[in-house]
Amino acid sequence: MSSQISQAAGREIPGDKGWPLIGHTLEVLKDIQTFFDRKTDAYGEVFSTRFLGETWIRLTGPDACQFLLQDSGNHFSTKLGWESFVGDLFPRGLMLKDDDEHRYHRRIMQSAFKKEAMVRYQSLMADVMPRLFSQIPTQGEVEFSEYSRQALLEIGSRVFIGESDPNRIDQLQKAFRNTVEATMAIVRKPIPGTKYNRGLKGRAFLESYFLDKVAEKRQDVSGNLFAQLCQAKDEDGNDFSDQNIADHMIFMLMAAQDTTSSALTSLMYALTEYPEWQDRLREEFRPYQTLSYADLPELRQTSWAFKEVLRMFTPGAVIPRRSKHEVIYNGYRIPANTVVSVSPVHNHYLPEYWKNPEVFDPERFAPGREEDKQHPFLFAPFSGGAHKCIGMHFAEMEVKMILFYLLKMFRIERDTRIPVKWQKAPVWHPKKGLPIRFSVLPAS
Ligand code: HEM
């Protein structure tokens, strides 16, 4: 299949409008993947739906992902794609910028993800994690979806923000949660007592916290991400204003926390469903008492397991863009100012590329198989193109570190006779939680 892109007139995109007023909103919110699969069967790889009061065009397949995300013709706006979901609560974040402004900010931010900065984050993680995980309850079950969210916020308070005052951490966590939860509010007006209003207040609290601390963090040498961002410069010496730093920190917390927590929860599910992989990873960790940054690339099987979880349980369900002008894709006419989206997870199950796609098989990423390499946009849990996740190596490092401590300390079990139901949007997670039992292992 080859993409033909031109400005000439094209065919009308097939699809239907769903229910009056609400369109397909309820079906999409209930189970986005089943909904899209059904529509793909009915209409093919390009179709339109109605969602949240707008026409949405959905493109399917790795070529479509490349067309939309690489966007070599500069037809689409990422800012306008995301703005209606997160723009009011997470304004001016990196994903809410386009073209030159985006390139300018991304180049400065990149310096907070260089090797020297990553080495510092890794050592901060190694300071926090052993104590944190040694406190996991070993009597009864732990609901892991909530536990991982809480643990990542705890780790994030130290590694991201460099905050150690427990009261402050508590306030920051509450404000952050309220802000994220408000992105799903249906009533989006600042009415006292509503979820949305709590979100706006949360945002205001976070903004004033970060603005107050910028001057101090510009001098902080302890290596947390907030300090690195305050001191970040591109090759031309450009740096961020105080307001830029507050905006980027708040957005980055949002981009990092629930996605990583989703991947970690799905990993726990996979390792209890396929306990032989738990043993394999434990064996891979056996030679190490602690981990250094240089050890991380040696943990190859852990990398494959992480990738396999991102393939099967891709945290982000949908990646939206908005067309800047009319554009033709594969003979179809995409009107100007229209939301166009892809879902990498759909491509992660295409049987023509993946062997037994329903089976957790991390070795599909091993040298010799590398099923993900058949198309540059076949495996895209971190998106692609100019907005590809800037924190993807950070996420892999954090997940590897957590697995290292958890699997060395505990055997992880779950009653696998009870099926787990998944909610696939906005971020993939178990609908009714994931109860896990942790049993202490003898020290190795
Ligand atoms: C498993 C964990 C993660 C997943 C699956 C994930 C996924 C994504 C995806 C799909 C995008 C691009 C969306 C688009 O193209 O519109 C993105 C962007 C981004 N992510 Fe991540 N992410 C993860 C972890 C992180 C972490 C740990 C950080 C920060 C430390 C982070 C920071 C960002 C930022 C700042 C952007 C915006 C990039 C830009 O617009 O240039 N993410 N992420």
Image (cartoon, rainbow, N blue to C red):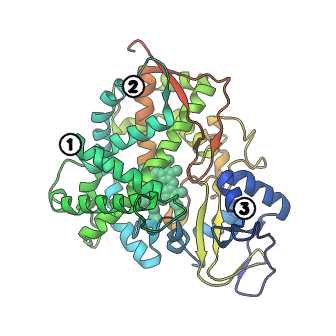
- Can residue 351 be seen by looking at this rendering? yes
Alpha carbon separation for disc pair 1 and 3: 47 Å
Alpha carbon separation for disc pair 3 and 2: 42 Å
Q: Position of residue 179 (x, y in %)?
A: 41, 57
Q: Is residue 322 above or below residue 175?
A: below
The amino acid sitting under disc 3 is Thr
Find residue 420 and report its image quarter: top right
Q: Position of residue 346 (x, y in %)?
A: 70, 53
The amino acid sitting under disc 1 is Asp
Which of label 3 and label 2 is nearer to you?
2
Tag on residue 165?
1
Compare residues 157 and 404 and report the one nearer the observer. Answer: 157
Q: Position of residue 231 (x, y in %)?
A: 23, 61
Q: Is residue 346 above or below residue 308?
A: below
Q: Quadrant of the N terminus?
A: bottom right
Q: Residue at x 45, y 20 (%)?
A: 410
Give the mark nearer the N terminus: 1 vs 2. 2
Q: Position of residue 21 (x, y in %)?
A: 70, 71
Q: Is residue 379 above or below residue 106?
A: above
Find residue 280 and report its image quarter: top right
Q: Residue at x 33, y 66 (%)?
A: 108
Which of label 1 and label 3 is nearer to you?
1
Tag on residue 60?
3
Tag on residue 136?
2
Q: Is residue 98 above or below residue 376?
A: below
Outermost residue on the front side: it is 192
The amino acid sitting under disc 2 is Ile
SS label for mark 2: loop
Indicate left or right for 41 with 228 as reference. Answer: right
